[in-house]
Amino acid sequence: MKKGRKLLLLMLTVMNCNLTFAEPEKIATLIINKESRLHNAFANSLKKKTTANINIKHFTDTLNSKGQFLIALGNDACKMVLESVKNRDILCTLIPSFEFSRLTKNSLRQKNNIGAIYIDQPNSRRLALLKENFPNIKNIAVIKSASSPTKNITADNHTMSINSYTVKNSQEIFKLFAHIKEKNDAILATEDKLVYNNKTIRQILLLSYRNKLPIFGFSKSFVKAGAVASVYSSIENLTEETKEVIDSYFSNRKYILKSKHPKYYSISFNEQVIQALSIPTSKRANGE
Amino acid sequence: MRRLQLTLLSFLLPSISWAESINEDYYFEDLPVVLSASRLEQPLIEATSSVTIIDQEMISASGANDIPELLRLVPGFVVGYADGNSPVATYHGLGHEYARHLQVLINGRPIYSPLFSGVFWADIPFGVHDIERIEVIRGPNSALYGSNSFNGVISITTKQAVSSSKSNIHTKIGNNNYTETYINQALLGEDWNYAFTLSRKTDDGFDSRNDAQSSNKIYATYNYKPTAENTITIESGYINGLREVGNDQSLDIIRDTDIENYFSRIKWEKSNANGDVLSLQYFYDKNTSDDIYSVDVSLRELLEFNSIDTSPYSDNLLDSSIGAFNNLDYSIFTVKQEIELTYQPHRGINDKYRYITGISTRYDEQNIKQYFNRDQPISTTQHRVFYNGEYQQDKFLFNLGIMLEDNEITGSDSMPKASILYRLSQNRSIRYTYSKASRSPIGLEEFSDYQGNLELNSSNNALIQSLIGTSDIPIQIWLSSGGLKREVIRSNELAYQLHSIKDHYNFDAKIFSNKIKNLISSPETSPIDFSNTDSLETTGYEVSFDRRFKHYRVATGYSKIKASGNDIGDEYTEAVPENIFFFYLMYNRNMTTLSSTLHHYSDVRMLDAGLTNDFTYLNIFYKYQTSGIDKRWLSLSANKLLNKDREYNTRNHVEKLFNIEIGFNF
């Protein structure tokens, strides 16, 4: 009887050991800038959503070997892991697609399993916002500087046309405005620090309002400042998708990380500006 | 276990291009709220008063020579000319050369004169071309704009460099020696912009009057944004000119007066990323004119003034000079200064409550030596506190506002306004509004001591002594006993509003009932004193419609007003026309614009000019404009095509006016 009990205990111990080996600890290391409120908000949101153990590291901290899966937030952290870390699985997020492309050109990506959830929206989604909600907008102006990081936008159908304007400096935007107004129904803002920055935004929005030429942004704050509408991904949108990638990663050890635009997004309309500019719209709703 | 040592080194030595790269903060950084609710037009179906907006399209296709002409496109407005250089605009009548029952604001700065309480439209240092938009509140709104916002509020917004980023020059000529030359320059920088206008205008006015004028105007606005949250606006204007005044009767001889006006406004505005707006504004406004003259007096004039029968005397004797009024000084001096602090927090998309609040202090100095019989100007101070809140609950919008005002003439008063609006659908609403507004007595009504000292020729002393009992003749014309109260209006409105963005039309209809008390009146006795003796009630309805089609625009308005009151000689009752109507049609295709305005009001008394007939105005305007940004244009306008022979008073013989204008952007 005693022998039988000892054998049973031994079997159980072996079984327990096997179980431990079958399901290793789910640890993901989130590399952030701890001084960034944005990064901290992301981390807090992600921790609430996922059951995985999230190990948070400042991007200049020393990394230990605990956790094979690294999630880097923002340009700096992503750059650091891509240039310095080997043999890990890396997901970059809160990073624009064009910056990620630039970083991965000369990185250690060959040795790593790398993916990204970009912060910016695909052009097709930006155009769909206009097409589905603002049926009268047919001719769209895109103003860029010569050093604009974004790719050219092309309309994928015959109902819209895109007119691109390249400017050398912000002063040129203001000079061009009358010409842009002649040819276009709206301006689609794209990421470009020379054209759209904290200083130029006031003149551009006032020009847009006074000339009755609606402007569509790329962030929620752009809408709040006075743009007609934006499609963007919020922190909640990005953490939701990150959580899904984490779940997939830990449920499938051979999971291949991909680089893609965010699956989840939000749309924000500025009803006051829509009313003030008398822009005809289809039925719409703010939301995610 | 191998540890991975990561250092900051690679980040401390970034390349320049990396430093300029776009990172996550670019998507989430707070931007200053530029188009806040305070700067945007409020949706018309949420407006708590009836509102008409005259936009840039209407302004540029109006053919108007003077700003009040544009108000013909507002339901309920009576527009006329007291003389060629004194346009008059009133809402629902009560017309006067210095119409006293409207508030007129230019970029938020009240421009009414403390002397007359009216607006010298001709003294505004810019013209029709400088106006971006006119917003007219049809009804009392002292709760937000203070006293004088009695029958309505006209809020004029001028063009900034952001709305006219091209410089332009134009010249306009017409009959009656009408000329206008105008040059405008606008420039935009990254954190500043400015617009600058120089213009000169001449106009001989009515053929039947001596009312020619010429003026030179400078107007400039400058906006500077030192930081993302702060904006500084400086606006200045200057006008000088020559104006022909008087008539060939009695003491008011024909003469030229020099006018000179200057104003400057500085505003600091701080708007944070939440959209809260704090603003501090100061303005200084000085108006002067030089008008001193002497006039001979005949025996006839003296006897008629004293109601003495002239029949016993020969014409030769009656028309002979018996003396003179020397150095009559009608020169105007007014200085206005105001400092105002307002705070308006942002209302988010889901916020149900929003408000604006503010305080202001205004200091006025005013003098016309002949009217006040004093060398030093009269100074008055006024303090205001206001609050206007709005609460949205489902389909209801509740609005409550109050203005507390204290001035040295009438003391303290409160002027409330309350409205309930119910949205029947996204495009339709019904509204009930109650408001109380007031008008403070002006300097002339409260302080006047207007007399003329007739200096007799020594040879006539005995004759005058025998005729009127004295040869010492200070003729007292006005003498205020003071202590006047505010004129008060209590207004009730029930309105239906329809606004379709998709189909480009607005419609509103309202029925109203106004009770006005303490109207200031002056009996036809000498010397004239002013007292709060009259009252007036007006009831009626008003409809307004404006629709844009692809190439057309139609706007029309009709007001039916019934007035009754307890007023001496029906002065005020007859100053309200029973019917006011306008119809505006515009056609715009390719490079051609054609428009016409028909404006009619029925029989009405102008308070300073007696009873007149009805008046119908018709204009036709044509404009050809090249396409592209460097536009060139030619316009022709024909005004007052259906006129009867009199306008405003019996002395103004109306004739058709024709203008041609050429201009170009550069």
Image (spheres, coloured by chain):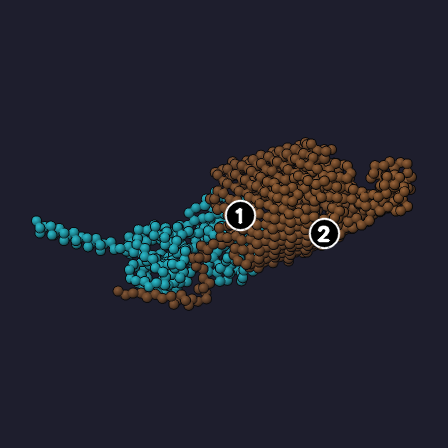
Write the residue at 56% across / 40% down.
B48
What residue sits 53% from the left and 42% below the top? B389
Closest to the observer: B482 or B227?
B482
Left or right: residue B495 versus residue A81 is right
Q: In the picture, which chain is cyan?
A: A
Q: Is mark 2 on a helix, strand or loop?
A: strand
Q: Which of B537 and B372 is in front in this view?
A: B372
Q: Which chain carries label 2?
A: B
**Labelled disc at residue B288:** 2
Amino acid type assigned to the residue bearing label 2 in the image: Thr
Helix, strand or loop at mark 1: strand
Horizontal relation, residue A84 to residue B576: left or right = left
Q: In this view, does B331 lie to the left or right of A28?
A: right
Q: Do the residues labelled 2 and 1 touch (CB within 8 Å)?
A: no
- Residue drawn at x 64%, y 47% as measured from the top left: B381
All told, the count of numbered labels is: 2
Q: In this view, does A179 lie above or below A105?
A: above
Residue that label 1 marks: B344
Q: Residue A166 carries which label?
A: none
